[in-house]
Amino acid sequence: MALDAKAKETALRQFTTGLYVVGSKGHGDAINGMTANWVAQVSFHPPLVAVAVEQDAHTCRLIDEGRVFSVNVIRADEAAEDIVGKFVKPARRAGNKLEDEEFTTGETGAPLLARALSWVECRVVAQHQTGDHILYVGEVVGADVNREGEPLVLAQLGWHYGG
Ligand SMILES: Cc1cc2nc3c(=O)[nH]c(=O)nc-3n(C[C@H](O)[C@H](O)[C@H](O)COP(=O)(O)O)c2cc1C
């Protein structure tokens, strides 16, 4: 039976996810942040997190260079849309998205946003080309809880990336 394209799109858009800012660090001072929802924990021991990144995203280039990434969990408050709206812009057009953003760096050098609820930092242990994205699997080597609150859920914004 042929794939029902509309049903496939609807069902995939009904997958419930959060919405995060994936931080990356390449060679030298090169850093970036990218809004992403294709993020998941994929192992307890060791703790592994996977993120799928578009092949032409600047983030892909930086993760290939630095072999690290961070996942910033965004707090579901009035600033949430501003944060994810900022990091959804491609670096090739927006330039340095972190220029006016407060952040620290930890174990890996990938940016950890001051406005995030919490974060994990990962070192890439595997990667695989999955169609038009690269799936990076990272071992969690650092984590912190920065604020109190609830994590942002994609559906709260009425945005989608999937289908
Ligand atoms: C709701 C939403 C979720 C997104 N999730 C992802 C994702 O999981 N992976 C991805 O590669 N891009 C995702 N994007 C698109 C990137 O944020 C966008 O292509 C960004 O410009 C890439 O930034 P960069 O080129 O600076 O790395 C998403 C966009 C939106 C609106």
Image: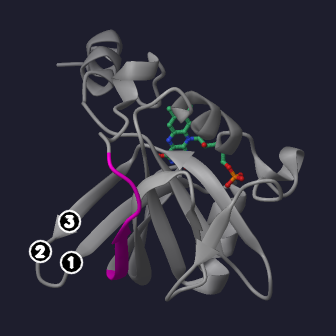
- Near-viewer residue (4 or 115): 115
Residue at the spot x=47%, y=31% of the render? 161
* Residue at 35 percent of width and 19 percent of height: 9
Q: Secondary structure at mark 1?
A: loop
Q: Quadrant of the C terminus?
A: top left
Is the CB of mark 1 within 8 Å of ligand 1?
no
Furthest residue in direction left, as rendered: 45
Callout 3 amino acid = Val
Q: Magenta residues?
A: 140-148
Q: Of the numbered discs in the image, which one, if any, rests on residue 162?
A: none
Q: Is residue 61 left or right of residue 21?
A: right
Q: Are marks 1 and 2 in contact (CB under 8 Å)?
A: yes
Q: Residues within 10 Å of mark 2 (few under 14, many from 20)?
A: few
Which residue is the site of mark 2?
44
Left or right side of 75 for 97: right
Tell me the quarter of the image containing the N terminus: top left
Report x, y in % for residue 76: 40, 33
Residue linked to disc 1: 47
The kind of secondary structure element at disc 3 is strand
